[in-house]
Amino acid sequence: MNTRTLLGRIVEAASGIVRSPAQRRATRLAALLRTLISQRGEASGAALARRALALYRGLDESGRLVFFQHLARDFSPEPEAVLAAATAYHGDPSAANLATLERVTEPPRQEAFRRMNMAPGGTAALLEMRAAVLSLCAKHPALAVIDSDLAHLFGSWFNRGFLRLQRIDWRTSAAILEKLISYEAVHEIRGFPDLKRRLERDRRCFAFFHPVLEDEPLIFVEVAFVNEIPSAVAPILALESAVGDPRRARCAVFYSITSTQPGLRGISFGNFLIKQVAEDLHAELPNLKIFVTLSPVPGLRAWARAELARPRRDPELEALRAQLAAAVEAGDVPPPALRNAFEGLAAWYLSREFRDPVARFHLGNGARLERINWEADTSTKGMAQSFGTMVNYVYDLGDVEKNHEEYFTRRRVVCSSAVERLAQLIEPLLLDGRLLEG
Amino acid sequence: MNTRTLLGRIVEAASGIVRSPAQRRATRLAALLRTLISQRGEASGAALARRALALYRGLDESGRLVFFQHLARDFSPEPEAVLAAATAYHGDPSAANLATLERVTEPPRQEAFRRMNMAPGGTAALLEMRAAVLSLCAKHPALAVIDSDLAHLFGSWFNRGFLRLQRIDWRTSAAILEKLISYEAVHEIRGFPDLKRRLERDRRCFAFFHPVLEDEPLIFVEVAFVNEIPSAVAPILALESAVGDPRRARCAVFYSITSTQPGLRGISFGNFLIKQVAEDLHAELPNLKIFVTLSPVPGLRAWARAELARPRRDPELEALRAQLAAAVEAGDVPPPALRNAFEGLAAWYLSREFRDPVARFHLGNGARLERINWEADTSTKGMAQSFGTMVNYVYDLGDVEKNHEEYFTRRRVVCSSAVERLAQLIEPLLLDGRLLEG
Amino acid sequence: MNTRTLLGRIVEAASGIVRSPAQRRATRLAALLRTLISQRGEASGAALARRALALYRGLDESGRLVFFQHLARDFSPEPEAVLAAATAYHGDPSAANLATLERVTEPPRQEAFRRMNMAPGGTAALLEMRAAVLSLCAKHPALAVIDSDLAHLFGSWFNRGFLRLQRIDWRTSAAILEKLISYEAVHEIRGFPDLKRRLERDRRCFAFFHPVLEDEPLIFVEVAFVNEIPSAVAPILALESAVGDPRRARCAVFYSITSTQPGLRGISFGNFLIKQVAEDLHAELPNLKIFVTLSPVPGLRAWARAELARPRRDPELEALRAQLAAAVEAGDVPPPALRNAFEGLAAWYLSREFRDPVARFHLGNGARLERINWEADTSTKGMAQSFGTMVNYVYDLGDVEKNHEEYFTRRRVVCSSAVERLAQLIEPLLLDGRLLEG
Amino acid sequence: MNTRTLLGRIVEAASGIVRSPAQRRATRLAALLRTLISQRGEASGAALARRALALYRGLDESGRLVFFQHLARDFSPEPEAVLAAATAYHGDPSAANLATLERVTEPPRQEAFRRMNMAPGGTAALLEMRAAVLSLCAKHPALAVIDSDLAHLFGSWFNRGFLRLQRIDWRTSAAILEKLISYEAVHEIRGFPDLKRRLERDRRCFAFFHPVLEDEPLIFVEVAFVNEIPSAVAPILALESAVGDPRRARCAVFYSITSTQPGLRGISFGNFLIKQVAEDLHAELPNLKIFVTLSPVPGLRAWARAELARPRRDPELEALRAQLAAAVEAGDVPPPALRNAFEGLAAWYLSREFRDPVARFHLGNGARLERINWEADTSTKGMAQSFGTMVNYVYDLGDVEKNHEEYFTRRRVVCSSAVERLAQLIEPLLLDGRLLEG
């Protein structure tokens, strides 16, 4: 044990705080990061970064927490220096004053992270670090500053310009395919044979990769080539279905899109991925005329239950409401007689409420809400989320910019006339409910 | 011509300022960047980025200046917002206040650059943009803020963790080899046959590449395998020399290191490159015991001329000074009788003056100043810079951290006893000169 | 229908033989091959070859038989021409006479196959063709000439100099891994997770590939790194076993080797594969001191049953024989009391009988018979072949040439002293049996 | 020195023949090949093959000759065995008799070569061996048997099905580009900058590679994209010409095709290469409508001189002949007045004489003789071969098979009406000459 460590122990003992070896390692790591961002770190950066990474990997859960607390507390900008620089910049917004301002307001954490990134495996470790921080933020809100710094860095590092779009097929490395199987978030992949069907010639799979995370798909999309806009997911997932000819299909269906990295939360690639894939497929297979999703409506049931909770004034509407509310509670696919009403509810929810996350993603990307599909996904999950309803969003590459504009500047969802009719059908029921509140 | 453009022309005409099409394009580009960093840019980012890049590429020199002036003036942080956020953070350094501070102090330029980077070829275009900005900064100092923002971004994007070390040999793409020929800054490469000799098995060449700049070496180093620390560069560069056996060499000489990208000025890879190459060669060829440079001393003659300009008090020293000054002016290799004195001057210059850029680079990396070599480079350039003197810096991987520490914290150059003796030899002459000043 | 085809039909009808469309296609294919090997084939070779291949692929089983019969009958050397050329060569073995001899004795089939090989997919199709021919040879012995010609060609085309040794690991294409799973002939692989364990860092898998059969391993070997020569296969195959450190293992075990192509029967790569892998592993992991197999003894039970069928003269030996014979019939692992006797039988069988195919392969390659392992493979197959016995053959790279020489020129199996002792132990029983016969 | 070698020396001394060490090495190598093709070679093949190759590489010129003489004399089929097998096969052409026949008629050399090929670098060494044999054949005709065996093997090994078509551009390895420069046989490439122009986007270069000869193009073709069928080569070779847009060109000109390997003499790839490249370019650039060569006429001048040597009966024709003969001797481009007559001679020579090697190649491939170009190549070589004349052969992919048929079965050159007219124009002159002979 060297003098320094010994001294540390004495101080510690004197202070009455007993610390575990992992906690002491956390403190040592924080000190090492200090050195790393000093001038010494410039010359011996790679070596120090390797040591820092090794220390970090050796931390257990409690050690990590101690380390994060150091990071949040001791690596933030100095308030005095910030205020002085801001005052000077306010007085004279010169290049020199701006330079000073930038220097003192950037949290030293960011430089520490950039230096850690120099060690082999650094980027992957930082991604995991952010995932760890995120999982602790609820209980330790002060750690949010670390999350924010990492998010800022990752936004820059994982810029779309640095990502490679790669086709995934049966000739892809098993190491990558295995990850697809474990990551898939929309329609579970049940092992390699299931995946193989999804990679046949009438299917496609594409992923974004970052050059330093070689075997790690960041986001991937699964596409099926079919003749008509699909109204149910089962035929697409069926293992034993005949393999079609991609040069005869009219329609490319994006039936599953999965982000894989919790450490990249909030850094969105989906928009780029869908559009790039649509463009590339269009160039490769000119027979493809329609690019469309088959998407879940995760918030529909919850919203409908809440919406249908309150009685209506109008007796007829009230009777309908009661029927619908009962059907929602029943849990099964609602009876055929109520199908139109439920489709109307879905149309209204998606076109007027702006709260479904999947809808927000596609409509915000400039897609058009095309069709409500009844009994489209009768899996347990599909029933629980939306009593089996799924929807199609159409990506018409010539219109996405205009649609996007409508969505954001005029707050209007572009949808097909069929969907619009369904929404208007159910309007009285919903407005009646609203009036009561008002 | 659409309404908007027409309107712009009218406003312009009214203001009495006549602008060229390129200047108007510059203004249009600035406006497009505004859109690009708005929410609309998020959905249509890739398409808008492509348009922005195309517009930028279409600018001529005057258009670029106009565009840069927009960038410098209109994409800086708001002084009011900065001061308010700084005051709040000073009052309560909470996570929320820090988040606001970060948001309002980051120049919107940076986001604009990140978005432009999404287009194919974006990174290369931004590198060229910084080179263009740098060449204008002297005349237009206000553009320094753009340089500073790009430097900050590039420091993050070209993090060593994202670079790939790649060996360059005769099987490398001609497109890359051609670049080495045109970039080489230390010892000119006279066409492919010259380069071929530098890639034989007793030579090595390594470069760092960034994944999105495929055929673009960012920095490269040339290495020769020899038996003894070399004292002259001509034998290494000789085209007709016999090719040696790399498994018998004791000594790896770094005889040329070139940074290729003006757009990456100030973002240093040389330190990483030399150490990584030394480590890798050491692992591959255990017979290599010495890792050493053969380096120019670019500032020696200019320094010596200035230093020898003032007469000395001591008559003997004054006689020496006059002889040395005459020899410096003569321009040839100084006469043999003065060799020791000149070597002493070089030793002093390098070990006491801390101003030679090459010396600062290697000593700052933790190398040791090993030997002064007389008549080592008698090319025109070599004579002009240092009357033919070159030096060896030794990279002893076990010592670099310690040496670096000495250099930065104690401001002491670690050098061999021979070099130290030479410096002490000439000390009286130099101190006498100093005393006069004092 | 064109004139030619019509004419063919008329001729056919007149002859009273009714032929199916597939049979007619077979005849057309044979005619096309005639053209292909004519001068016309030289200019339009690629196009004709493609047509030939397409025709061949369209043949059903009966069509294939007709085609093969054409090939066997009509594409053999002309007996008259052969005799004339041989007589001339016998009279004057000049270069010119030799050239004529070569030309007229090479079956035109071979040129036809070489031309077919020019079409994309040709090599794979010819491999399949030989597999089809082989499966028909028993019933149609005349087809043996086709087999022989293809074997000759393949011996040349699949020369070891043209094969690439490639490591297979978890990053290998799923398309290739899937083939390993389906091909594995020694110890069944039960899906991707089972295979994954066999590709961890304490395991290795290598295969030979031919450049034009990209995803097709021709032969592969599975290796396990362990500390001692293994005496049972279950620990190696266990899915849940801890993964060891390859740099600490002393022993590389070749526990499975599988040839995949029925079309390459008789063209042996195993010898090259094992030695190359042993050399490469030795260079990569100097800690590996022993290269050894864990091999089945497929013919042991059948041989023992036959050997033990006849009574012995000596009453003691006869008693033993009866016990052993009963145990063989019982089918289970024999009782412990008989273990030594059974091990002796195995030792004798392998060291004196020269008939076990696995033993012939390894001993012919120059391996040493090292150890008999009791209860080493209690799978159904292992019990049926050898009442659970397996053996180790050691590849001592310094000795293989000498051992090989012993085996072939002196007909002596090199074995460890332990194995030799076991063989001698059981000698009286076996010699007594022989004497009776004599 | 071991006993065997000593004994050899004694025998040698006794025989009075003194042999050099290289000659003794040649004899040792022949003995080693004997072992290599024995059963022992099967087990230790790779090791023995390596030794054989090393021995071969150590041979000097005289050693190689001795070795080749061994190969020619001692590795041929046994005449007795051949005659016996042929007689048996003649008596009964059974599968078994055929198998025996094949075995005893194949020269053991071929097996020796196949075994040598197993060593690393074997294929390249055998190619060089054939080149060496070919250069000795004129003086040592007995070596022709080796050439013939190697040609047979290479015909099988370098089957088009095993070759890879690869595009060569400026991103290709310098090692390969350097070979193009040194191999180019038609229009000399003067260093890397010249080659670079030939690889710009309005040019293409393709080569066939064999998988085991990685950096060795076997044959390559250079293509230029232009708007009209070119009538001169200088504009295509001009270094400073503007780079055109490949998507606007109508015409792909094959202006140079070079076979690189003397060891592959007689094994033709050019036909495959041109047709494959034409097909691929057609698919990539549908704007390309014409695929045409710009070809030298190497034998024209020599043929014309001979043809014009004899006086004509008809006085007018005789006057013309004398003028033409004088112009041929003069060596310059003939005077304009004679242009038509000379073009007629070229047309006749190419369409009626069947002896120009370049014409035979393209017409045999099914090309059409399109145009005679006056003053098309005024380089020294162009003048010497054909007083500057070049021709265009058109590859019309739809017609090549038909044209080829005409050429080989009806002995008719397919040519444009313009060329045919030129040939008819000059007919009287040539027929008059012929009548005299008759």
Image (tube, coloured by chain):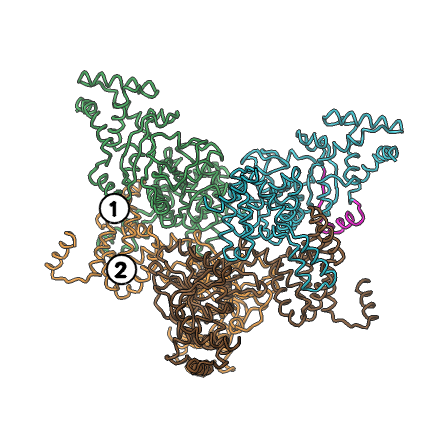
Chain colours: A green, B orange, C cyan, D brown
Which of these two is toward me, B109 or B121? Answer: B121
The local secondary structure at tag 1 comes to loop
* Residue B38 image label: 1
- Horizontally, residue C359 falls left or right of residue A245, namely right
Q: Chain of mark 2?
A: B
Residue identified by numbered label 2? B58
Q: Amino acid at mark 2?
A: Gly
User: Quarter-wise, where is residue D418 in the image?
Assistant: bottom left
Q: Position of residue C170 (x, y in %)?
A: 53, 42
Q: Position of residue B347 (x, y in %)?
A: 48, 71
- Horizontally, residue D195 falls left or right of residue D47, namely left
Q: Chain of mark 1?
A: B
Q: Position of residue C321 (x, y in %)?
A: 83, 28
> Bounds of the magenta span?
C391-412
- Horizontally, residue B22 falls left or right of residue B367, namely left
- Label located before the other in sequence (2 or 1): 1
User: Quarter-wise, where is residue C220 in the image?
Assistant: top right
Compared with B423, C421 (above or below) is above
Mark 1: give few (<14), some (14-19) or many (20+) Cα within 10 Å: some
Q: Amino acid at mark 1?
A: Ser
- Horizontally, residue A144 falls left or right of residue C370, namely left
Q: Residue furthest right?
A: C314
Compared with A238, D347 (above or below) is below
Mark 2: give few (<14), some (14-19) or many (20+) Cα within 10 Å: some
